[in-house]
Every structure is written in structure tokens, then in C-alpha cells.
Amino acid sequence: MITSVTIENFKGVREPLTIDLKPVTLLFGANSAGKSTLLHSMLLAHELLANGNCNVDKTTIGGTLVDLGGFKEFVHGKDTSESVRLSFKLDLGDVDFSARWPLSEKLIDFGSTKVDARPVDDIFDGVTEFVLSWDERAGAAFVSGCEISLGDVIFAVLRQTGSGRRTGSNQVLYLNRLHPLWTSVDVGGDGGILSKLWPISTLTPEMIFDLCSPYTKFDLERLRDECVEFDVRDDFDPIAELESAARNSDLLGEDEAEYGDDDEDEDESDLVSDGEYPQHRIACSPVIDELCREDDVSFRVLYDPVAIVRNKLDFTEVLPERAILYRTTDGVIGCAALLYDAVHSEYLSVDDPLTWAESAGIPFMTRQKLSSREDFIELSVVATDDFPCLNQALRIEPPAEIADGEFGGVGKFDVEFLGQLLSRYILVPMQVLREELARIRYVGPIREIPSRGYAPSLSPDPARWASGLGAWDLLHTGPESLVAEVDHWLRAENRLNSKCGIERLYSQLSFPSAGVTAAPVSGLKWSARLGKQAGAPESVTEFRKTPHVFVRNHNQVLLAPNAVGVGISQVVPVVVSCIDGCHLQRGDSDGMSGDHTSGGVDDGRILIFEQPELHLHPRVQAALGDLFVEHAATRQHPRRHFIIIETHSEHLILRLQRRIRETEVNKAPADGKLRTDDLAIYYLKQEDGSSRALGIDVDVKGEFIQPWPDDFFEIDFYERFKTGEDG
Amino acid sequence: MLSEFAFTPAIFDEAAHDDKEAWGEQLRELTSAIFPRTSVGPVVISDLYAGSWSQHIVSYIEKISDHRARKYCQSLLTNMHRMLVKRPVCGVWPSEDDAAWCREAIATHAVEPIDRIISVRKTKDSQNENFSIVRCIDEVEDGGFWRGINADASPRMVIAEQVDLLRKLCLHSDWIAVINAHGFTSEQDFSLHLLEVAFRRPPGFDPIHVELHAEAPYVSDVVERKVRQERVALNMARNIERSLKAPHKVDLCFWPKLLDRVIVAGNFAKESDGTIRKRPRWGVSMNHVARGSEPNIPPTEWKLLRADSLNDWFRKFVAEDAAGKSPAINVNPRR
């Protein structure tokens, strides 16, 4: 699922503009503020990934309603020396990397050792960013860069220097060697496989520490004194032990001699001998030795907590003094640290300093810009086509500094394996993004009214939804339950209450069967259901049954869609889009039941609506809020739609505020529950030549938390009360 | 700066106004001044009886038969809603007794001043009541009614006068952020006096959380800079501890560079998952603050912030996700 979109240098957006997507996302703002621009960027990204098209004018999803005009038009300021950036944050928690990109073996022979290439299972989110640029020489747009972040850290950056079909390599891959995926080490129970990705089993401790210390290099002595890792009993209390150590020793300017010489410490003799450290072992501090004397000692370097605080860029009023990394007997990994607060002159016990550091705003290996080349491994990619090609593994050329196929002195460098491995973590997120973008259903601001001679399209065409005709197609060809549900939503008093409904009937042309000579044509017969009509002669062959969708007005007259008010034709595509893909079962008292999904489960999309409130009575505009709430991917129905709405309707937002208020006091309708974290509101405005998005949050009372800019919802008040120069 | 108005329900009672035309004009005049379009509204509205007043008013408005007047009052109440400030309960529930509402307003005014208590002539002239401080809705058309009601101020360079101007803002806020480059150093006295004013809260008013933001001392040497900052923070904390009592809270925040003097203040709002968020409501831009008592120095200029500016300052310095915001240093009450 796409959870966030960031665009830069696209149309009116110069500075990075970010929108977090919630089950219901509203975009408000003055005209030409950039609302549609954000939506169109998603259509552009779809074109890029699905069709490899960088110089986009018309889009598959936007049809004739969206014309981006090509790169020269949609780059900000029409300045082709600038690049357009599109960035999407993805929820990858449900993505099975292994299934999507299987490798031939789980354990890969990698020279002298085996590498555990089983995928990591703790990638919960990631960011995929594309940079589109203009190749003046080739006169074409191309993807000049693609950046993949897993978690909050850049994993890899792919750069392409020019456009055009190429043979050989003009693509360069920069791997962030400091990404936690590379540096996390998991000691297997049998001690055999250590690295999730790299064959670290044969690396020396110095190399381990080097990888784990991204900003400062730690010598072994320092780490030995400050960071201990061992297995402990389940009732081990690291905080208590740390505090005890603090009370019992002077931790500032501590003298190592206080703990005695290493060589004399019998408990350490098994661990350290003659200054050489066995693989994977770190000496214990004698304070901790008291606790673990009876325990088996094993070592696991997870991360260096000292590095956390050292990464802090601002003020270091707290300093780490002691840290313990530990693993309980049931395998829980933990870290505790004792920090010194210089301001208050006291020690602060922190359980899980990583979380503490994050909450204190101290970045741990935060997302880096490609400014420090030394942190990245540069690899050439053998490319035969413009990037991105998501279904072929990356072909890597080994780095120049690797001699004779050796890499870091660790066995033979397997180029193909590396390419497959990298492809899994670089291309799979892009595949996920492509699939998500393909699920967008865009309904444009002006919906077409089916003409009198309208014939539905039988083939799915996303572009028809942009004009609204896709909804009429589905009403003609979709399941009966869908039509019934749309009818219910239009007519019911506790729904849109539009006084109009939808009904589908069938015309049937009757022809005599072959071999029988008879006068042709018995005329059109209407039937509500497909099937042979009672009383029809056996010899009649049903030639054609054609569905027709009518609007039944308040006088129960069946009318063609173009014969009713425009409002109905404008709202029907919105209603159909929301209902399609949602498994709804209503009680018998409503008379509605049925499943118009496949498989009886919700199959949500990303729905984009521009101005769904057009031509609608204010009361109906408010009721649209309930339509969105009921069909959005809230906690009640997590697999329903993510709905993005560009709107000017105050009535719509008032209804959403009301439902939040009612939900808080348990007075919301059963299907009308909305929480504050289900709703995102953005106000877009033009400022200093660029669009800016201001998030407006709502509290449990349905009140805005931030002030609404530009008296946006006070227009009617001022129009009512002001005269003359008052404004 | 901020002025507080209290209204009795009769303002919205159709039966209390014989001249409907005049009533409409008075409402129009009132809203024009309270909700200026092109400048900042300087008025907050007392939500008397612990916030029950605003709910009680709804029933009056619903009963208005004149559709134009009803529409006026509905819109007025809708917009008043964002200006409401709660006042604790002082007496018995006034119900439909407008004079009782007057008494309630006067009682809470005695605890903390209200700038205008406004009712109707019938209530003000009630027998056996001393409503001399109560104003009538028909006075809103007099220029004198609005004297002193202004979003802008020109305080003298006297600490006591300046912090007094901020009393209303402090009283009705759950949190305040004081952003002042010199707030811990040469203008520390202003900060400390403001804290004392903020902490002085009558029963029924929630405790306050104050953030003091100041510029970090600049020294080129990194180590020395850290030492100096610690010293400044320690000094400030010791001074604050003298007046700080639980459950009030004070945090100190350092910034690399500050140029302005701004106060941002507001209340707390809750989200569905229980998260408490800060909601900005008011802001004051202060050209200068006093460093002592210097009445002979020309007065300075202070202004209430418009919504856009308030938003910007809030997002830049106070919001939970403000970029570059270093961890706050909590000041603990002295035990």
C-alpha cells in the first residue's frame, strides 16, 4: 500500500511536497493551488512503471481528461535542466520478498562459506523514488535516478547518465554499505550462518565493528570495555545492574585497572587469550561477569549504542557510559544503556536506547543523501535497456578494486548471485509500487452523461472511469448486487437520499430458430432477468439480451441517464467506484444482500475523485462523507479503498468531522465509524512560486487542531455579515 | 492583545429584543468587530459554567422565529465556537435565568477579570441587582464600548506591564511557547516574570506547560559550546525552580539561531488513539521585551499573529514533528 507521496519540480510544485495517504484523504485549496498536480503525479508514475514512458502526455488511467503535455510541459517552470522527483513510501509488511524473487537456493555457496540468502523478515516499509530528467542530446526524457530505501535508510541508488537504448553499461548502482540489512548480524544457533546477507562468518571482529560503526571507527578495546553482549537468565534486569554499576564505580574517567588485568581474570580466560579474540567473541566486563558466570556466553553484535548518540548532530547533553546488549534464553534481543545527563548531573537508565534515541530525535543511520561516496559501494550495471526494467535481474559488474574475484578477502565474488540478491531488494519494491499504481481508479472532475445511444464497453478500460463512463459500463455488465447497492445508496433516506434510483432491465430480441420460416421479429420484450420468458415458443432462439440501465425518478418513472438532472449523472460514478470492490452484506431488514466482489472479500483500490460534489445539493454533499467512510479502509474493513478526494465542499468535511465526533462517544452509525487517524486533510496553497501542503489534523471532537489558513471556511460568514469595505 | 467577552444567553433570545431591526444591527456590529476579516480578532468568548454556556445557547437560537435573525445567530455561534475559553463554575446552574448568568459572569470576573460582560437592557436593569459593570448589547454601536479592545499593543518597556498584557493568553492556554533568542540571558527576567504570571492560576484552570526557546550560546569550539550551553541551561533551570510547582511543567529548548521574539500558545487536543496534540490558538509577535523597568524608553510594538503566521511559527518551533527541534530539557520542580 502506498502510504505517502512526495513530488518535486512537477508542474506547479517546485519544493518537495508530501502527502501522507490515509483511508480518507482530502485535498483542499484555492484554484490552481496544486491539488490536481499531486493526483496527476500518481498517474505519471503509473505510466512510468507500467509502460516505461517518461515523456508522458496522456495517461492510461486519466484518459482524455488528463494531459500532462510531456516532460517539457510538466517539469516545473518548463525548465528542462531540472529533474522531476516522484517518491512513494510503501507499506512492505505483507510483501514476501522470497516468493516474489526466489533465489535458486536458500543457502548459497559463496566461495569458502555459505551465505544465508533467506530474505529478511523485518522490512516493514520502504521508499521508492524516481528522478526524471531530460536528455538534450537525445531529445528525450529518461529516468536518471532511482533510489530505494528500506526502512528509513537508503539501500541503493541507481543512476543512469543518459537516455536511449544502450548496449553495455551506462547505469551505476550505489549500494549503501551501511544499511542495517548489511550490518545486522544474526548468529545462528549452530553458529554456522551468521550473516543475513553477507558472509560475515569469516569476517574478523574488526571488520564487524567497522560495519557496525558507521560514523566513527571503534577500536576493539573501546568496544570491549563499553559494550557487552551475552545470554542471560530470563529474570535478568539490565537496568538494575547498570545502576548498580554506576553506584559502585566512577564511570567517568574510569580506570580500567579497577577491573583488574584481563589476563588475570579467570572468567575471561575462556574468552580472551593473549589479546587475540576468537571469532565473534567480546570480553566481558567483570561487573557483568558476576551475573553470567554460570551462563553460556555467546556474542551478538546488533548495533553499537554509542554510535547512536554520536550520530546526534546537535547537542549532546547525554552521553552513553555503559551499554549492554543481551539476549534472553527465549531469544529476545535487548539493549540497555546508562546515559549521563550533564544538565541535571544524573544518570539516566534507558531500556532500549535505540527507541530512546529515536524518540529523542537522534537519528540512527538516517536516510542519507548521496553525498558521501565513501559510504557507498559503486557497481556498474550491465543494462541493455533504459531503466527501469522490473522483471529482469540486475547484472552487476564486479567492482574494480576486487582482484581475482575476491571480495574483502572473503571468498569468491559471485556476480550473478549478487545481482539476484540485489534485484530482490531493489526491484521487488518497485514491482509492488507498480501494482499499487495499477489499482488506481481515477474519476475526473467532469463526468460524462451516457448518450442516448450509449453502449457499454465490455472490456475494462481504466480511462473510461476518468470520464465516469466506466461506472455506467459496470452498471450494465456487473453483478445484480452491485446495481442493487448503488440503487440503495442513491435512494435510501439514510444515504444520499437523492430521490432517484438505478434499475437495470434487459431487452430481448426474439428470432425464430433455424429452419422455421416465419415472420421475423416479435419485437422487444423487457425482462428483469435473463432467461427464457414464460410462454415463449420452444422454437424461439434468443438472439440477444441487452442490459439497459435506467434512472427511476421520484415519480417512479424510468428515465435514461441523460434525461435526469445532471447531479445524478455526476454522482453515480462516485457511488459505483466506492461500492465496487467492497463486500457488503446487509441485514434482511434492508432487503439487501449479496456479494459483488470476487471471493467474498474486500478488494480495495486507490480511488481518486476530483470534485465529487459537483452539481450536488449540500445535503447530498454531506452524505457523500458517509459514502466515503463506509467504503474506506478503516479498522473495520482494512482491505477496502484508500480514497483521495480533491474538493471544495465544506459540507463533506463537516460530515466527516461529525462522524469522528460520534465515533468517539460511540454514537456513530455501525458503518460510519471514523477515527482521527483514518482521515488526512491537506490545504494546498501557492507560496513563493511553489505549491505547499499544510496538514490539518482533527481531534476526537471533530475540531481542527491547526488553524485553517486563508479563512477558507469562513467565506459564507463574511459574505453574510460584511458590507462595503469590511471585506 | 486578547480581550475576553462574556455574553448572557439573552443576547440570542428573540423575546428579549423588542426592536428586531436594532437587534440585527447590533449583532452585525458585534461580529464585525469580533471577527475582522483583514486583521486578527482580539476577542475570546467566555464559555461560562465550565463550558455549558455554549451548549445552552443552542436552544435559544433554535427558537428564534425570524429566519434572518436565526441565521445570523447560527453563524455567529459557529464562529464564536473557535474563540471560546472555558470559565470554571462559580455558582448554581443559571438555567433560563439571565440575571443568574450575569451573576455567574460577575463571579468569575471577580476571580479573573473579564473585559466585557454583555447582556440586554432588561437584565441589566433588573431590580435588586448590582450589574453596574454589565454592558448592554445596544452599547456596541458606541465607539467607547470598544476602547482598549485591540489586537495590537504598544507596551512600555516595563516588565510588569508587558507580562500583564499576556495574562489572558497565559490563563486560557494549556501550553505556551516563548521564543526569544535572549530569553535565558539578557532577557531572562522577562521570561521568569512571565512564568510567574503563567503559573498563577485560580482553581478550575488547568495546569500549564511552558516551553522556553532560546538561542544557544555561540562559541566556535564544539566542546566549549556544549559546556556553555549546559551552564546557561543550569542557571535558567535553577531560577525557574524557585517558582515552578507541580503539575506545571517547563521545558528549555535551544536553537542554533533565533531572530524574533514570538509567543505561541494554545490548548491540547486528543486523537482517536489517545495521542495528545498541541493545538495552536494564539500568537504574539513582540518587537522587544523589557529587561527591567525602563519607562522612559519608547514603547515597543506587539501584535497578535494571524492564522497563517501562527501556523508557521507553530510548525517551525513547537509542533511535535518540528524539524531540527532538539530534545527539550525538562526543568523539575524543586522538591
Image (cartoon, rainbow, N blue to C red):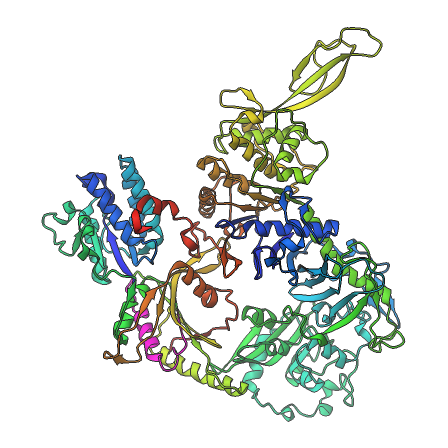
Q: Kindly tell me whether residue A637 is visible in this rendering.
A: no
How far from the left and from the top, in percent, is residue A362? Answer: 57, 72
Is residue B195 among the parts visible in the rendering? yes
Q: What is the magenta range?
A: B178-203
Query: A593 left or right of B48?
Result: right
Residue drawn where x is 67% and y is 40% of the image: A463
Q: Residue furthest top?
A: A518
- Report the number of numbered marks: 0
- Judged left or right of residue A464, residue B282 is left
Q: Is residue A661 above or below residue B199?
A: above
Would you place residue A158 above or below residue A47 in this image?
below
> Which residue is more in the foreground, B328 or B221?
B221
Side of B13 relative to A517 (left or right): left
Image coordinates for residue A718, horizontal then vertical, percent: 34, 47
**Residue at the farthest left position:** B128
- Return the x and y of residue A54 as percentages of the image width and height: 71, 54
B208 shown above or below B192:
above
The residue positioned 73% from the left and 20% from the top of the image is A544
A245 or A25: nearer the viewer: A25
Indicate yes or no whether the magenta region holds residue B10: no
The residue at 43%/65% (across/down) is B313
Reply yes or no: does residue B187 show up in magenta.
yes
Residue A623's x, y, as percent?
Answer: 48, 37
Identify the residue at the far right of this view: A404
Which image quarter: residue A601?
A: top right
